[in-house]
Image (spheres, grey):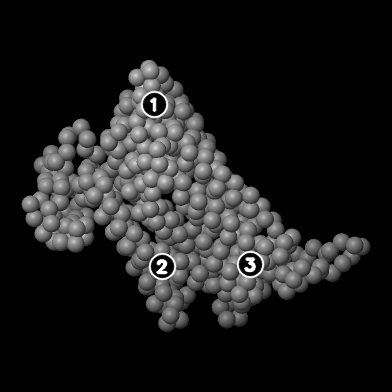
Amino acid sequence: MDLVLLSRVQFALTVMFHYIFPPLTIGLGLVMVIGEGIYLRTRKLEYRALAEFWSKLFAATFAVGVATGIVMEFEFGTNWSTYSRFVGDIFGSALAAEGIFAFFLESGFLAVVVFGWHRVSPRWHYFATVMVFLGSMFSAVWIVIANSWQQTPAGYHLVTNAAGFTRAEITDFWAVVFNPSAMHRLGHVLLGSFVQGAFFVMSISAWYVLRRRHGTTATKGFDVALGVALVASSLLLVSGHGQAVAVAHNQPAKLAALEAHFRTSHGGAPLYLFGIPDVEAKRVAGVSVPDLLSLLVYGDPGHPVTGLDAFPKDELPPIGVTFQSYHAMVALGMLFIGITALAVLLRWRGRLYDQRWLMWVFVVAVLGPLAANQSGWVAAEVGRQPWVVYGLLKTSDAVSRTVPVGHVWVSMALFCTVYLGLLAFWLLVLNSKIQLGPEHVDEDRESGRPGPMLGGMALLEPRTERRDPSTGGAEE
């Protein structure tokens, strides 16, 4: 394995592992805001217990996300020094904005969210929860802007120094921020994050329902997350369409790779539902809908679509990986709409929580949004190849040439070892908190009134379990 490919594999592994956590915190943040908002409006203590429970899962996930994200910034300098010199003026400003406007906001208020339940007023605590949620979203905003600039560069000019090295400099900051693909991609990323967080909450809540634990608290948590999941999944369909149209205009080679469209069509182009691309034969063995690609992209079933044959061979992305990852993302997105719509229908009829098979589906369905987000990232990044900055800098020219291949192997092995340890630690922490579940919140505790006193100290009473007669479940 040569240096370029090995460096790409290392960076892909670190990014894909890190990308488990930011979407989850964004989605959990939205569910926290909704759940705590319902509590403030209704004063139903089940929502208070749920918001406190979700904040603990958020904190554990946020900590691992921060730890894994730092590694990528070091890799920009170690493995991709040429790239860093080329885009440093632009990428660096976005990363600085992410640190100032997102990370500090999120981490600053997180302590209030986790530890301030009995120390600040409910309204002040809700304000902190909203700030944490906004901080998690602002983090995505600046990272997506930086990445989108690589896909569709704008607001820059090229400067060559005396040594002959060329780099990009900002000429229009707002043109960088609102580059042609940024807002389409940002909306898609945020909606995908909302789906991942909602399915995470539904998975835990469904498990409680199956185990007959936490009674109405579990079902109310499922209801909140189900509403988020259905709305976000449906909007993802709209967002994905808008992004595909933008890709057709800004990166036609990527669109051709996403759909394995080998030859430029003179009329309408088909859209493949699934299949296996044959690069040598320049065809796809699969199921397609005639003229649908032209209709979706251009609004005209007879409109020509540029094929891979219109681009130089050395500027074509890998077809197989791009095609399969993109179609996997689309298929999973349609599945999310289907199962959440079914669940809403059953909930409306009052039969949802009697369907144990569907509850089991939701328990394992948490893996679906994770796979969809990863597949979408792979499709976007691999589909951009061979460019690291589209049309300006190729990936093969961006790597650090002075780093020995052996060093990359060793560092990648160490990263994998540490990441496996972090993953195991995160899963253990989550499991311990999920097994414990939401705590029962009584009126005295919520109102801030002290419990029974003995010698100046509040009695610490053991937690007891009470059963909800309507469900037969236990609530702690």
Q: Secondary structure at mark 3?
A: helix
Q: Amino acid at mark 1?
A: Thr
Q: Quadrant of residue 85?
A: top left
Name the foreground residue: 336 vs 161: 161
Residue with the most extreme front position: 171
User: Label 1: how many residues lie within 10 Å, few (<14), some (14-19) or many (20+)?
Assistant: many
Name the foreground residue: 351 vs 110: 110
Q: Is residue 175 above or below residue 357?
A: above
Q: Residue at x 17, y 38 (%)?
A: 311
Q: Which residue is mark 1?
A: 82
- Mark with earlier residue (2, 3): 3
Q: Is residue 387 above or below residue 283?
A: above
Disc marking residue 441: none
Q: Amino acid at mark 2?
A: Val
Q: Position of residue 172 (x, y in %)?
A: 40, 41
Cα–Cα span, label 1 and label 2: 42 Å
- Mark with earlier residue (1, 2): 1
User: Label 3: how many residues lie within 10 Å, few (<14), some (14-19) or many (20+)?
Assistant: many
Residue 214, visible in the rendered structure: no
Q: Which residue is mark 2?
A: 231
Depth check, mark 2 against mark 3: the one in front is 2
Q: Quadrant of residue 49?
A: bottom right
Q: Residue at x 17, y 35 (%)?
A: 312
Q: Position of residue 469 (x, y in %)?
A: 61, 81
Q: Is residue 89 above or below residue 342?
A: above
Q: Quadrant of the N terminus?
A: top left
Q: Secondary structure at mark 2?
A: helix
Q: Which residue is mark 3?
A: 49
Q: Amino acid at mark 3?
A: Ala
Q: Secondary structure at mark 1?
A: helix
